[in-house]
Image: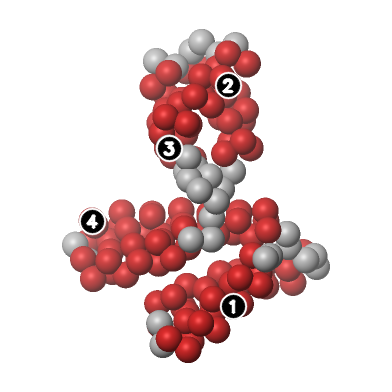
Amino acid sequence: MALKEKLMNDLKAAMKDKDKVRKNVITMVRSAIKQREVDERVELEDEQIIEIISKQVKQKKDAIEEFNKGGREDLIELTQKEIDILMEYLPRQLTEEEIDELVREAIDAVGANSKKDIGKVMSYVMPKVKGKADGKTVNKIVMQHLQ
C-alpha cells in the first residue's frame, strides 16, 4: 500500500476512534504533502513523502529541546506523542552500531583522516541513511571517528 493511501486510511480510523492527536498529526503530514505537490506540480512518491515526514520529526525534536528550556512538560509530552506517530510512517531506524558501521565504511571509501573530511564522509553516508537515521546522530558518530 502506498504511503499516501496508508495516511488516508489511518486518518479515517483516527477520526472514527476520536483520536485527536493522531488525526492532527496525519492531517499535518497530508497538508505538507499536498503543499509540495501543488508547489512543484508533481505527484510525490513514497521516498519524497518519507523526506517530508523525516523533516517534521526533526522539527518536533527541535521543539522538544525548546520546550525543555521553557519547562513546558505538557507540550513536551504532546510533541513526543506526535513524534511517535510520525515514526510509524518512517522505515525502521538504524541503530548507532549500524550507523557506526556505515561511517567506518565511508571513512575508508573517501580516505578521510581528519576533521576537515567530515563533509566528504557525511555526503557519502547521508544518502544511504535517508529516512532511517537522524543527521545529528550520524554527525556525532562521524565526529567520534575523525578526532
Q: For label 1, count other residues whose C-alpha is less than 10 Å away and answer few (under 14), some (14-19) or many (20+).
A: few
Q: According to the image, label 4 marks what residue?
A: 69
Q: Nearer the viewer, mark 1 or mark 2?
A: 1
Q: Is there CB contact under 8 Å for labels 4 and 1?
A: no
Seen from the viewer's position, the closer of residues 135 and 17 is 17
Q: According to the image, label 1 marks what residue?
A: 9
The alpha-carbon separation of the residues under discs 4 and 1 comes to 37 Å
Q: Position of residue 123 (x, y in %)?
A: 61, 30
Q: Earlier in the sequence, mark 4 or mark 1?
A: 1
Decide if residue 119 is on the left or right side of residue 14: right
Instruction: Give the SS element for disc 2.
Output: helix
Q: Is there CB contact under 8 Å for labels 3 and 1?
A: no
Residue type indicated by callout 3: Thr
Instruction: Give the SS element for disc 3.
Output: loop
The type of colouring in the image is secondary structure
Residue type indicated by callout 2: Ala
Q: Is there CB contact under 8 Å for labels 3 and 4?
A: no
